[in-house]
Amino acid sequence: MVVVGRELGHRLPREQQRVPGHLQLPQPRRRRGPGDGDVRLEPDQPGPHLRRPELRVQAPRQHHRAVRPGGGVVSRRPQRRRARGQTLVEFSLLLPLFLLVIFATIDFSGYFGARLSVENAARSGDRVAVTEPYASYSGPAIVSQVAAQAQDANLPSNVDCSWNGTTLAPTSYPPFTWSSGRGCIGIWYFEMRPAGNPWLCGQWSVASSSWSWWTVTGTTTTTKDNGCVAAGSDIVVVGVGYQFSPLTPLPALNGFNTYGETQLLEED
């Protein structure tokens, strides 16, 4: 029976030959190296041929540089520098146009103001001229009134304007011009006649502070005609010319002249 029992014991499957767990003695755990076979894993022990995951944190303000296939490092410029460069180029292209628009606006305002100043000066001077009698003080009184109204234009008060022609109807426009300086002042007297345009009979010169006289034929004379500088018989014309200097450096705007002229009948 013993022999049979042993033979039967050897013939039993391996699972039935195992001793139940509550009858087995505790066995010490043994750690095995990488060369061992199947290994029982501990809770904190990684499996064979496995690596623990490593978390790599990139340091702040550092950039990885791309590597070329043939070797070397590809340099990459920050996007912010490109944006700044593009803005600088666009600003440099638009700056001249922006400044041109600003200066053109300033020049237009300055020219408009100078033109109003010149017209007001001619109107104010003519109102004084038609009430002033023929005397040595008449001319300076008219000039001072014109200069006071043209302060914004900085008008010179010692340059004469020259009338184009010998009658009230000028031969060309503008009706008067000047040879030098930034402006001029002209005070003319035109005597009326029964037929034809009034003829130039006298002028007060602001350059020499004296009177100049002409005959009906246009020749100069030293004596005044009876109907010249007389109430109700002549027309007083005061003209003011001014050369405007713009801020914009454009050749087309250099030497741009403006004129103001007023004609009134001589009064008592």
Image (cartoon, rainbow, N blue to C red):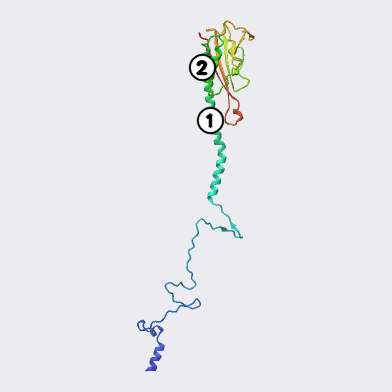
Looking at the picture, how far across and down is residue 127, in whole percent?
51, 14
Front one among 104 and 267: 267
Whether residues under marks 1 and 2 lie with C-beta atoms below 8 angstroms apart, the answer is: no
Front one among 142 and 217: 142
Residue occupying image coordinates x 54% and y 46% = 84
- Closer mark to the observer between disc 1 and disc 2: 2
Q: Where is mark 2, residue-wise?
A: 124
Is residue 40 left or right of 143 when viewed as pictured? left
Q: Residues within 10 Å of mark 1 (few under 14, many from 20)?
A: some
Quick one: which residue is furthest to the left in this view? 22
Front one among 252 and 157: 157
**Residue 36 higher or lower than 70, as above or below:** below
The CA distance from mark 1 to mark 2 is 27 Å
Looking at the picture, how far across and down is residue 253, in whole percent?
59, 28
**Residue 243 higher or lower than 71, as above or below:** above
Q: What amino acid type should be assigned to the residue bearing mark 1?
A: Ile
Quick one: which residue is furthest to the right in this view? 219
Residue occupying image coordinates x 52% and y 25% = 113
Looking at the picture, how far across and down is residue 247, in whole percent?
57, 30
In which image quadrant can residue 135 be found? top right
Task: Indicate which disc residue 116 carries.
Answer: none
Front one among 59 and 252: 59
Q: What amino acid type should be assigned to the residue bearing mark 2?
A: Ser
Element carrying mark 2: helix
Q: Where is mark 1, residue-wise?
A: 106
